[in-house]
Amino acid sequence: MKLWEKNYEINKEIERFTVGRDREMDLYLAPYDVLGSMAHITMLESIGLLGHDELPVLLRELRAIYGEAVAGRFQIEEGIEDVHSQVELLLTRRLGDMGKKIHSGRSRNDQVLVDLKLFTRHKLREVVDAVGALFGELIAKSNEHKDVLMPGYTHLQVAMPSSFGLWFGAYAESLCDDMQFLLAAWRMTNRNPLGSAAGYGSSFPLNRQLTTDLLGFDTMDYNVVYAQMGRGKMETGVAMAMASVAATVAKLAMDACLFNSQNFAFIELPKECTTGSSIMPHKKNPDVFELIRAKMNKLQALPQQITLIKNNLPVGYFRDLQIIKEAFLPAFDELLDCLDMTAYIIRRIKVNEHILDNAIYDPMFSVEEVNRLAAAGMPFRDAYKKVGLDIEAGQFTPCKDIHHTHEGSIGHLCNDRIEALMHETMKQFSFDRVEQAEKKLLEP
């Protein structure tokens, strides 16, 4: 069954090539296609294109199909082109001609647009929750080890005193900025394209505000041409936000791999979270963080993948856009898996509290000594030269009792402010409104 079928059959090889992985990808969208259809037919009834007695019957069957999709029992049958065709086929089988009425006033173009928006905002909420959970673990570790010093590096050379409070807290604050990108992605996503049809609207008197409210969107994509132009643009914006999160997590994973090695020994991963070697019995490999690093680096290419598919398309719909699904839809699960695993490991990391017992780290206190001399009245440049000569002569004795007091320093982490920044951003997501709208739509 194809929604566009006429009185001829398409060449089988052409069909194989053009359908591609559409059926596989559309299974991600099945529950959301049903939700969009429920809102659409409710609107159709309100403008007289569906009978008062037909609406409750259709809604009942759509709720049943939604349940099947959520439970993983929904399948797109062989010979059925996509999720939209399958839903309409199931309705027609169960209700006869009544099932054929649900497509009035829309195209598969705006149907898949709304499916993608509903799917994406659902996944964005999961990502926001997972980022928030990782943030919490990092802040907790930062507070727990705020007084444990560690070397700070520039050029991979021992540089100045840092702390585990700073290290963990830095990644927590990085996630605050990532959350700003996720908020922008959410706002772009949570706009309703339904009613734009094939990209040029409809002669039916559609009530687009009604479907916007029924689906819990903040607003609609107003211009019908732009609604179609948004296909690919939304995915790019969301992918950029995901890539921002991925960059933070990849960098953290790199640090963890480095700091877990014997040469650094700053942290220790629990042995049950490491893997071994088939030949070297002593090995405890940080495979988890290595895979997280690789997967998050791969995810940072997602915006470029999407851009290269869509960047030279003129206005209107083109089948090229279908290929974006193959990169975009599965990416959320990979990101979520890595976020969950990172939070799990961070909670269990052990910190070495005696790093500075090793004299190789003594030179990192040189700046502290320069600043002490300068504070006592010696010109800074003279203090710098004196300490440098003492180090060269092997006469430098570090004072490891340091006192940093300014905002964001070792002695004043500002974690409470970082937490407030994160919580303020998270409050701006309209999750409650969406949840209430979907719940109301699904209620008998």
Image (cartoon, rainbow, N blue to C red):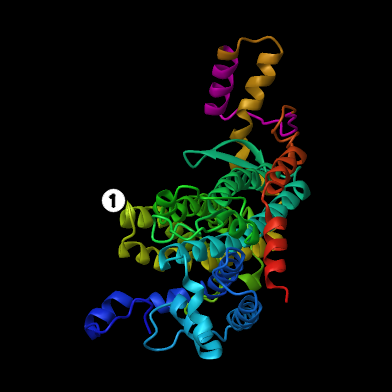
- Tell which of 188 and 148 is nearer to you: 188
- The secondary structure type at the circle numbered 1 is loop
**Whether residue 135 is visible:** yes
Image coordinates of residue 12 in percent, x first then y, are 24, 85
> How far across and down, in percent of the image, does residue 53 sit?
65, 78
Q: Is residue 157 above or below residue 109?
A: above
Identify which residue, 100 or 22, lies in the foreground: 100
Hey, which quadrant is residue 176 in on the image? top right
Numbered range of the magenta stretch: 382-404
Please state which amino acid type lies under the numbered disc 1. Answer: Pro
Residue 198 position, x and y percent, is 39, 61
Asked if one can make out residue 290 in the rendered structure from this viewpoint, the answer is no
What quarter of the picture does the C terminus occupy? Answer: bottom right
Q: Residues within 10 Å of mark 1 (few under 14, many from 20)?
A: few
Left or right of 367 on screen, residue 236: left
Pointer 1: what residue? 314
Front residue of 39/34: it is 39
Q: Reply yes or no: does residue 192 show up in magenta.
A: no
Point 45% across, 47% down: residue:
223
Tell me: residue 149, above or below residue 132. Answer: above
Residue plotted at (52% across, 63% down): 292
